[in-house]
Each structure stands twice: as C-alpha cells, then as structure tokens.
Image (cartoon, rainbow, N blue to C red):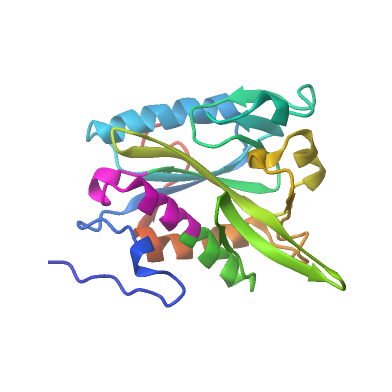
Amino acid sequence: MLAEPLNPPSIPAESRLFRADAQAVEWVVSPGQVPYDDAVAAMEARVAAIAAGEAPERVWLLEHPPLYTAGVSARDGDLLQPDRFPVHRTGRGGQFTYHGPGQRVAYLMLDLNARGKDVRGFVRGLEAWLIATLDTFGIEAGPREGRVGVWVERKGPGWSREDKIAAIGVKVRKWVSFHGISLNIDPDLDHFGGIVPCGIAEHGVTSLLDLGLTTPMAEADAALRTAFEKIFGPVAIVTPGEGGS
C-alpha cells in the first residue's frame, strides 16, 4: 500500500484528494490567449477520453481574451453590459463571471472515480488549493458561507469589506470534472463592471496587484503547482500540444 501523503498544517485533511495509485496529472501551461470555444472543445475531448480510460487526467493553465461566461444559474439581469465583451453560455455551475488577460484560469479534468466520488469534497479541495496558493504570497483568504469562491477581508480607517479574488465553477460528467477556477493576478478590474460577478452585488473583486503585489504569471503558476500537489497529488509537466487534446 502506498504511504499516505503528508498533510500540511494549512490544508485540512478532508480537502486532500489524492489518487490511491499516485498516477501523475498532466500539467499544461498555454502561452498567449486561448479562445474560449477552443478551450471548451479541448476540455470536452479530454473529458471523454478520461472517462473512456484512454487519457490521463489534466490541469490546463491559460488566459482568455476578455469575455463573460454564464453558468447554468446565471440570471439575465446580472449581465449589465451585454455588448461590452463576448458572452459565452456554458454548462459549468455558477452564474456570470469574467475572464481576461492577467487572470490565471485553470481547467481541471480529473477523474473523481479515483478521488472519492464526492463533488462537495472536490470543491472544498479547490478552495483549499487556492487558499494555500494565496498563502504563499502572504494573503489570508478563505471561503464564505453562502458565497462561492475565495475571498479576502480588506480594512481601512473606519471601513471594512470582503472582496473576491478567485472564482470556482465546475461541471462533472461520468465523475470526470471540467471547467475549474480563475485567480485574479493583475486583470483590469474595471472589466468586471459589465456583470454582477457570481450574482453577488454587495461585494467587490480584487487581485494580487490590487492588494499591492506585483506577481509574474510564472510565479503564480509555480505557487499553484506546489499547492496542487499537496492536495491532489503529483503532476507531470506536458508541453502544450503533447498528449492529444
């Protein structure tokens, strides 16, 4: 039997989703901006191949051109500026969100058949992954009751508020996950003004840069990879274009 991986103090035991066989997950980072429809088509193909036992799991890190996506719970009234950027209706959970340059999107195509078949546990694992990543940069973040994503508390003389720094929206088919998370590194936060992000109007949106941290994308990727391995297990670096769609 494989030894149980160590549990870092900052990552709850129930958030660990290791495979019993310790099979490595492909880790792919795409340069430039990937069109949204192209990304969805590639995810669909890989998810089908994973479900058929014909391809390994994959995490795909990328950036999109500016766009809005609408999850299955999106309300039309939350699209405040429908002509500002392209709007993509998508099958992931959640409501409206923004994607664009300076935001690291990570699509996770993981076989939950081998990771406990627990969607709520999977989402907790995604939250823990983002929290551990942000902790690398000295940012205290966490989930909030009744609100999807990862949040930070901000304070000043006579005021305080909570801003969202990372979004989560997933879909599961035949116990294989796709879609995933987005982490705000240094996007144009004004671009979020065309929607009510995730249907929550009373809170704001922030980023690493907005919090005073100038962070190269490669540095954010390294932190994401380290934290991912602590929760989900080992990865194998794959060059974009290798291993099929």
> Foreground: 2 or 125?
125
Q: Position of residue 196 (x, y in %)?
A: 72, 38
Quarter of the image for the N terminus: give it. bottom left
Q: Is residue 2 above or below residue 170?
A: below
Instruction: Please report the residue visible at 29 percent of the width from the left and 37 percent of the height from the top.
Output: 55
Q: Is residue 176 visible?
A: yes
Magenta region's main secondary structure?
A: helix
Instruction: Please report the residue visible at 72 percent of the width from the left and 34 percent of the height from the top.
Output: 66
Instruction: Please report the residue visible at 68 percent of the width from the left and 43 percent of the height from the top.
Output: 200
Q: Position of residue 3 (x, y in %)?
A: 20, 71
Q: Residue furthest left?
A: 1
Report the magenta residues as a range: 110-127
> Foreground: 43 or 146?
146
Quarter of the image for the C terminus: give it. top left
Q: Is residue 72 above or below residue 7?
A: above
Q: Residue furthest right?
A: 157
Q: Is residue 242 visible?
A: no
> Foreground: 161 or 118?
161
Magenta stretch: residue 114 in it?
yes
Count of marks overlaid on the render:
0
Quarter of the view holding residue 50 = top left
Q: Residue furthest bottom?
A: 9
Q: Position of residue 108 (x, y in %)?
A: 43, 44
Left or right relative to 25: residue 164: right
Magenta stretch: residue 242 in it?
no
Q: Is residue 155 above or below residue 65?
A: below
Left or right relative to 203: residue 23: left
Q: Is residue 68 above or below residue 150?
A: above
